[in-house]
Image: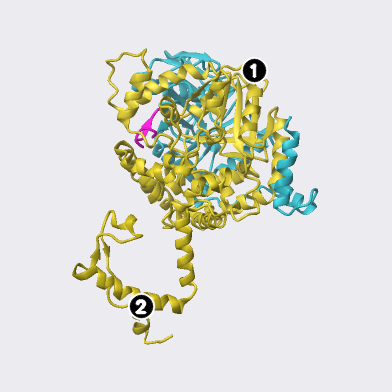
């Protein structure tokens, strides 16, 4: 998929002016925040579970090589196969190899972000295959030729009316006079159409919320049931997963599942949590003939042992973006790649480079809501700050920003000089502002004064007021 | 094919963690966790005595939009299924697997047309037998195989599941222990945990029941202790 993180600023200007998008984004705040809080309030052990979830992932990452080896042995013992992929291109080639051996034409897909990360759909089409997204949200955006704007609600940027228009445009075999006013009818129509596709699939692709070393099992957590139909009715099940999805045991997965569902959708438990181990067994009347896991690194092993290691604890619940004022304002597409919101602002520079994604960690007010709701207690603001430092060190910002920061730093590091300069600047600004006591425009402050007046400074400086109120002198 | 990639990835992970190959201390830590399988934090709600478990299971399952009925013996099952189908104006058909526990139920006295096997997608109603239940969340646990084909859990519009009251555990961890005992360290191809009928909120975050899986989930709790004295 085309990366547009470089033009983040331009993307946001477009997003802010997009009336349909702004209307749809209202559903994020309405739909997620209250539900999560209610679910959290109902479980007194929620914070203890968070702590244990963090401990499990930290332990796993410290021993990840060994758990991966244990996992592989179990997958192979159950008749499945694990393929290592260094990067996106490698993962696509592995997939093509599996597909060619089966002569695959149709590929059904449950929701998987790794598929987005490796750009699988475009690649399948280029190679003469038909990818069919089966998650309702993914299906809608596939019809629109778009990408997900949210990691658990891929079509959250779209309104009901737009879905109706898309269905009428694409489902031309159906009665044009049909009534699609109620959302239920849209769901029923998608259900009917996708029902025919599952069984035609040569390959069913899913992601994985967890890989379990104890049993060699992949786990998907869903509500619709499409992921299950995809992996059950396709002749071959291919799991796309990244290396940090590993957990040691079924018990460990149970701990994290408790915080995942509540943080994501505010459910006590998702409708379907499905544990898959190998291909169908001898006596099984249904199930896939082959089971493959493509295990993707794509830069993750390089995050281990760095200041970004904790990001590998992420379980992709989406709580950080659901609570992010920046995400609420500009939506997921503005971030320009697969992972939006605060987790994307940290992960994207790690995976595609800070040169391309340096804008993202800057798009934060550091209000800290993301960290406060993160079930895995990932210090997202701290890591965004690390990226800002790296961006500065690599001279990636515009010259004006660097000069300005340099100038400010010169004064900030010399408190006496700073206070002296301010004691001159304040009365001067007050004088220039005149009786209105505010500025309609001011050099270097156009970003502010374009939308509102800047109040002129009045009275004493902060330090003067502070010193007097404390009755101390320094 | 990707053997060299595997080595490259694993050695990068080792290096980042400052580990040498064949580091015995690390191997012991991993072995201990895989064997010991620490429980972690099991919520108080998931540790109720068995008498209270069934009640919590029912409350939680209903909160997840499932319907629940109780029977005292397998002989009552056909009547309960017939009642359910009739009250919902559903056709008197039923698809089920080869589970012996279900064959104790004699459907010949009802008008229900029962067929056996996996679903091809044209069955409206299916009947399964759950392996276990989870009181904490009102969750059913079903395992794949000829007894209860996985397709019966997802393709029919109305899924009826029988669960024996004494298999309702407090929490998921206890269910896994049950599965380990039964399947000896591995799992069946598929273990489905199911909490209510399928749903989607992908259109404007409005919750709709009956997405790609069943539109209705009916749970029949078989509690033999509640059966009338013979």
Q: In the figure, the cyan chain has which letter?
A: B
**Main SS class of the magenta portion in the image:** loop
Instruction: State the residue in front, B151 or B92.
Output: B151
| Residue occupied by mark 2 | A423
Q: CA distance from mark 1 to mark 2?
A: 77 Å
Task: Report the span colored magenta.
Answer: B201-210
Residue B126: percent from left, percent from top: 47, 21
Please count the marks in the image. Answer: 2
Quadrant housing residue A281: top right
Figure quadrant of residue A84: top right
Structural crowding at the residue carrying mark 1, measured as other residues with C-alpha within 10 Å and reported as few (<14), some (14–19) or many (≥20): few
- Residue at x 32%, y 33% (from the top left corner): A159
The correct choice, above or below, for A289 with respect to B203 in the image is above
Residue drawn 40% across and 77% down? Answer: A419
Secondary-structure class at tag 1: helix
The image's mark for residue A102 is 1
Q: Residue at x 64, y 17 (%)?
A: A102
Residue A282 image label: none
């Amino acid at each position: 998929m085309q990366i547009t993180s470089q033009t983040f600023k331009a993307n946001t200007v477009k997003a802010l002016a997009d009336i349909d998008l702004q209307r749809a984004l209202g559903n994020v705040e309405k739909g997620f925040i209250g539900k999560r809080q209610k679910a959290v309030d109902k479980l007194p052990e929620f914070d203890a579970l968070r702590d244990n979830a963090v401990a499990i992932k930290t332990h796993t990452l410290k021993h990840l090589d060994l758990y991966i080896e244990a996992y592989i042995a179990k997958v192979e013992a159950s008749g499945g196969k694990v393929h290592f992929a260094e990067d996106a291109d490698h993962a696509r080639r592995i997939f093509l190899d599996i597909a060619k051996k089966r002569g695959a034409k149709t590929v059904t897909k449950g929701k998987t972000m790794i598929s987005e990360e490796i750009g699988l759909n475009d690649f399948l089409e280029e190679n003469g295959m038909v990818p069919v997204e089966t998650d309702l949200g993914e299906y809608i955006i596939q019809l629109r030729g778009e990408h997900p704007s949210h990691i658990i609600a891929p079509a959250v940027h779209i309104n009901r009316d737009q879905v109706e228009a898309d269905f009428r445009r694409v489902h031309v075999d159906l009665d044009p006079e049909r009534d699609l006013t109620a959302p239920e009818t849209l769901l029923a129509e998608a259900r009917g159409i996708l029902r025919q596709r599952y069984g035609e699939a040569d390959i069913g692709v899913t992601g994985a919320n967890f890989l379990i070393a104890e049993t060699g099992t992949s786990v998907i957590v869903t509500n619709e049931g499409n992921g299950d139909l995809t992996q059950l009715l396709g002749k071959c099940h291919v799991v796309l997963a990244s290396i940090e999805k590993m957990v040691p045991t079924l018990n460990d997965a149970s701990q994290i599942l408790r915080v995942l569902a509540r943080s994501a959708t505010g459910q006590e438990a998702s409708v379907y949590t499905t544990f898959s181990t190998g291909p169908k067994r001898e006596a099984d009347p249904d199930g896939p003939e082959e089971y493959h896991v493509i295990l993707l690194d794509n830069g993750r092993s390089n995050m281990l042992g760095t200041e970004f290691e904790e990001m590998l604890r992420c379980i992709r619940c989406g709580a950080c973006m659901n609570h992010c004022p920046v995400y609420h304002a500009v939506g997921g597409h503005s971030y320009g790649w697969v992972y939006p919101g605060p987790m994307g602002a940290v992960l994207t520079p790690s995976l595609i480079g800070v040169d391309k994604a340096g804008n993202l960690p800057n798009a934060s007010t550091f209000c800290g809501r993301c960290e406060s709701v993160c079930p895995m207690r990932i210090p997202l603001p701290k890591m965004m700050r690390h990226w800002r430092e790296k961006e500065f060190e690599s001279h990636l910002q515009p010259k004006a920003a660097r000069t300005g920061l340099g100038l400010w730093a010169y004064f900030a590091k010399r408190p006496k000089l700073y206070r002296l300069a301010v004691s001159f600047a304040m009365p001067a600004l007050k004088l220039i502002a005149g009786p209105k006591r505010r500025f309609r425009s001011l050099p270097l402050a156009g970003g502010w004064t374009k939308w509102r007046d800047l109040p002129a400074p009045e009275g004493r400086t902060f330090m003067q007021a502070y010193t007097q109120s404390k009755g101390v002198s320094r | 094919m990707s053997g060299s990639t595997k080595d490259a990835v694993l050695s990068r992970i080792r290096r980042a963690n400052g580990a040498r190959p064949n580091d015995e201390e690390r191997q012991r830590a991993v072995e201990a966790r895989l064997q010991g399988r620490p429980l972690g934090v099991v919520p108080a709600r998931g540790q109720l005595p068995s008498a209270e478990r069934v009640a919590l299971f029912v409350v939680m399952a209903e909160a997840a939009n499932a319907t629940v009925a109780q029977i005292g013996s397998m002989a009552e099952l056909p009547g309960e299924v017939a009642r359910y189908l009739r009250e919902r104006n559903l056709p008197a058909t039923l698809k089920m697997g080869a589970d012996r526990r279900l064959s104790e139920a004699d459907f010949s006295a009802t008008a229900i047309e029962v067929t056996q096997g996996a679903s091809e997608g044209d069955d409206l109603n299916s009947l399964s037998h759950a392996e276990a239940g989870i009181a904490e969340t009102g969750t059913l646990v079903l395992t794949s195989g000829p007894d209860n084909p996985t397709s019966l859990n997802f393709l029919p519009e109305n899924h009826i599941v029988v669960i024996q009251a004494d298999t309702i555990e407090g929490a998921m961890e206890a269910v896994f222990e049950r599965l380990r005992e039964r399947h000896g360290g591995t799992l069946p191809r598929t273990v489905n945990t199911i909490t209510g009928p399928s749903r989607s909120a992908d259109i404007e975050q409005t919750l709709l029941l009956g997405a790609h899986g069943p539109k209705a989930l009916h749970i029949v709790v078989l509690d033999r202790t509640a059966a009338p004295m013979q």
